[in-house]
Image (cartoon, helix red, strand yellow):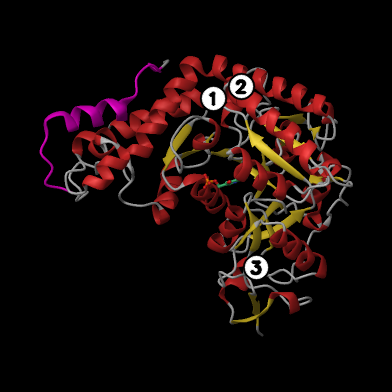
């Protein structure tokens, strides 16, 4: 039976609860009265709706009321069997997927350019990674999707793996051939897990690539907060496989998810789902149109190379998400890091992220032509003011490191700090990455290469935020001691 997607059960219940009731429960700010500065900052409504679980508004740990209704609506909206509302981002959805699929020592196949949440999932679950090197577009200096041939070979060599992990899309908007990968993986009874942190909108437009659930994947983790219109940190975990026990998945989620799930976040998921179902098609098609307009205008400037659907090659770029305005800037003579900084400091324009060779701006539900024009003007101005000789493409980010021990083993053994610049050849005990996007250049258990050191030092010099090490100054990195 079709559900009534115009409803938003959590939203309705929270509004009703806070209309007349007097709170003698937490949160202690008591709907903003106890913290006037917070109330001034967030507004009366946000404070009023920041409530804790109770009978009328259900409980995310064990939902039987409005949260359960919202989950069912969410599952139906995405065509999945089950949906779980997540208040700790796609990070915890990725971790729950991996833990649901693999037990300690079991193999999982994954591309090495995963987000750190996936490698942290290996630490939590004890699963053993079998990495597939993503293919590289040398001209643009970006990693691509997984080739079906590579996947097939890896699956044949590791028929005992429990799951395969796919990113849909990558940070730059690139999609692998999920449909074929699902077919191969399912022949070997492997689960297909998809990190769709950047792909929520795929489900609501015929002009976008398809979502993992539509392509037969078993579990997908979606950051609704990134491209679906909900509040930061709110995500969804979808399941489409009758053999995966939803109660087991919930018990995994409950290991790390808070017992005080934020109703602001959950309500935002409820309202984002309602909007996506009712108006998503138009909103996303408008965003795609704006992205095409931006692409066209930026190409007219010259020098900048804007990625487009022309990249599609039927394999490692099986599809392309045009709402990722990904731009190669080497002809301008600046790095992506520098362009991001200049746009912020001189033009008040905030970009999602940059790396050595490129930068990427997200076009989504709330963008306007006026804002796109400001970005185009700024890029034209930057080219006039700053253009220098073409930069050499920096390659190191894509060198797949040698794995010495599993991430979990590396995480738990004794470690000592050494100067990062003198760590070549040693085994790292921690992550190091440029953030965003948060793809580890080095992950726990990997041998630190000279190229990785050079890349991190270069990125730091160009202004990238380097994260992951316990030492906040990034001078030292912990290495394994045997
Ligand atoms: C590919 C990918 N996966 C997972 C995550 C984690 O998502 P969240 O920030 O919602 O925890 C991110 C975040 O940027 C991401 O880019």
Question: For residue 340, which quarter of the picture?
Answer: top right
Q: Is residue 277 inside the magenta stretch?
A: no
Inter-mark Cα distance, 1 to 3: 37 Å
Q: Position of residue 416 (x, y in %)?
A: 61, 82
Q: Nearer the viewer, residue 207 or 292?
A: 292
- For mark 2, give the secondary structure: helix
Residue 23 to residue 305: above or below? below
Label drawn at residue 365: 1
Q: Position of residue 70 (x, y in %)?
A: 37, 29
* Extreme-front residue of the structure: 385
Packing grade of label 1 (10 A; few <14, some 14-19, many >=20) is: some
Q: Is residue 18 inside the magenta stretch?
A: yes
Q: Which residue is mark 3?
A: 444
Label drawn at residue 287: 2
Do residues under tags 3 and 2 come within 8 Å of each other at their CB atoms?
no
Q: Nearer the viewer, mark 1 or mark 3?
A: 1
**Residue at left offset 41%, top offset 32%:** 269
Task: Judge: label 3 CB < 8 Å from ligand 1.
Answer: no
Q: Left or right: where does residue 80 sit relative to residue 7?
A: right
Q: Nearer the viewer, residue 153 or 296?
A: 296
Inter-mark Cα distance, 3 to 2: 39 Å
Query: Looking at the image, how many numbered discs can be counted on the residues?
Result: 3
* Extreme-bottom residue of the structure: 482
Q: Nearer the viewer, residue 344 or 436?
A: 344
Do residues under tags 1 and 2 come within 8 Å of each other at their CB atoms?
yes
User: Bounds of the magenta span?
Assistant: 3-25
Q: Position of residue 278 (x, y in %)?
A: 46, 15
Asked if residue 471 can be seen in this view, the reply is yes
């Amino acid at each position: 039976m079709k559900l009534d997607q115009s409803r938003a059960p959590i939203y309705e219940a929270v509004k009703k609860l806070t209309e007349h009731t007097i709170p003698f429960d937490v949160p202690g700010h008591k709907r903003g009265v106890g913290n006037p500065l917070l109330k001034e900052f967030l507004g009366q409504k946000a404070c009023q709706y920041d409530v804790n679980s109770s009978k009328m508004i259900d409980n995310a740990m064990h939902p039987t009321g409005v949260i359960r209704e919202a989950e069912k609506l969410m599952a139906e909206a995405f065509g999945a069997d089950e949906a779980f509302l997540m208040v700790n981002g796609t990070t915890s959805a990725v971790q729950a997927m991996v833990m649901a699929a693999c037990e300690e020592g079991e193999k999982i196949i994954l591309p090495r350019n995963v987000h750190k949440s996936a490698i942290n999932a290996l630490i939590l679950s004890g699963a053993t990674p079998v990495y597939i090197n993503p293919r590289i577009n040398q001209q643009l200096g970006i990693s691509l999707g997984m080739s079906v041939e590579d996947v097939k070979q890896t699956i044949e060599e590791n028929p005992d793996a429990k799951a395969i992990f796919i990113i849909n899309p990558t940070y730059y908007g690139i999609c692998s051939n999920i449909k074929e990968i699902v077919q191969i993986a399912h022949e070997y009874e492997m689960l297909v897990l998809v990190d769709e942190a950047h792909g929520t909108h795929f489900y609501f437009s015929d002009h976008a690539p398809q979502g993992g659930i539509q392509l037969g994947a078993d579990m997908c983790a979606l950051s609704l907060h990134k491209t679906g219109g909900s509040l930061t940190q709110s995500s969804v975990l979808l399941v489409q496989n009758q053999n995966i026990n939803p109660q087991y998945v919930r018990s995994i989620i409950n290991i790390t998810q808070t017992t005080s799930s934020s109703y602001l976040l959950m309500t935002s998921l409820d309202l984002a789902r309602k909007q996506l179902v009712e108006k998503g098609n138009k909103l996303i098609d408008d965003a795609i149109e704006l992205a095409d307009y931006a692409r066209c205008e930026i190409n007219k400037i010259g020098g900048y190379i804007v990625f487009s659907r022309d990249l599609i090659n039927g394999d490692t770029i099986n599809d392309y998400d045009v709402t990722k305005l990904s731009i190669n800037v080497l002809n301008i003579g600046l790095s992506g890091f520098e362009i991001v900084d200049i746009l912020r400091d001189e033009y008040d324009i905030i970009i999602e992220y940059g790396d050595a060779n490129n930068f990427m701006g997200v076009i989504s539900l709330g963008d306007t032509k006026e804002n796109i024009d400001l970005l185009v003007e700024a890029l034209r101005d930057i080219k006039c003011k700053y253009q220098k000789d073409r930069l050499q493409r920096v390659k190191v980010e894509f060198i797949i490191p040698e794995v010495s021990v599993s991430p979990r083993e590396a995480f738990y053994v004794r470690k000592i700090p050494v100067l990062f610049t003198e760590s070549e050849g040693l085994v790292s005990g921690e992550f190091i990455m440029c953030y965003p996007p948060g793809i580890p250049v080095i992950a726990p258990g990997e041998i630190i290469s000279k190229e990785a050191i050079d890349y991190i030092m270069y990125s730091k010099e160009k202004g990238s935020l380097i994260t992951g090490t316990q030492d906040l100054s990034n001078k030292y990195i912990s290495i394994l001691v045997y």
